[in-house]
Image: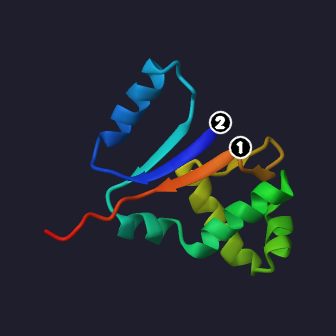
Amino acid sequence: MKAIIEVSRRNNIFDAVRADIAAGGNEDFHLAFDSARLLFSELTPARLDLLDTLRKAGVCTVYALAKAAERNYSNVHTDVVRMVDLGLIERTADEKIFVPFDDVEVHFHLAAAA
């Protein structure tokens, strides 16, 4: 399963889910933002780096992720909480964290000036 993060108009995510179901339901996770500005305010370079570090590290604690990323624990904890809220990171029963996706894609299009 992969995560597809995109910039799209409101309710366009429902169109993508309907298309997935019609194609046999590949169960991809879709996360949509109304603008590139909003996408990049939520998924900062630091958060994308954390997501990549966590995918490579596998299931671990927030403390272990902070060590692996060579970042301050408090800042990593804040970023992890937000990415859990967005659905990009999940927690185990014993509060360890992991990325539940085989792949993460980010899509956005820049329109030509009219």
Q: Are marks 2 and 1 in contact (CB under 8 Å)?
A: yes
Q: Which mark is residue 102?
A: 1
Comes first in the chain, label 2 or label 1:
2
Q: Amino acid at mark 1?
A: Asp
Image coordinates of residue 42 in percent, x first then y, are 48, 66
| Residue 84, image x, y percentages | 61, 53
Q: Residue at x 34, y 33 (%)?
A: 15
Colouring convention used in this rendered image of the protein? rainbow
Q: Quadrant of the C terminus?
A: bottom left
| Picture quadrant of residue 67 | bottom right
Q: Residues within 10 Å of mark 1 (few under 14, many from 20)?
A: few
As drawn, 21 above or below 69: above
**Residue behind mark 2:** 1
Q: Residues within 10 Å of mark 2 (few under 14, many from 20)?
A: few
For the residue pair 82 and 14, the one nearer the viewer reads as 14
SS at circle 1: loop
Q: Is residue 18 left or right of residue 82?
A: left
The residue at 66%/62% (across/down) is: 80
Does residue 1 lie above or below 97 as drawn? above
Nearest to the observer: residue 43 or residue 8 = 8
Q: Residue at x 66, y 47 (%)?
A: 103
Q: Which of 7 and 10 lies nearest the eye of the viewer?
A: 7
Give residue 78's position: percent from left, percent from top.
63, 69
> Which quarter of the picture shows residue 70?
bottom right
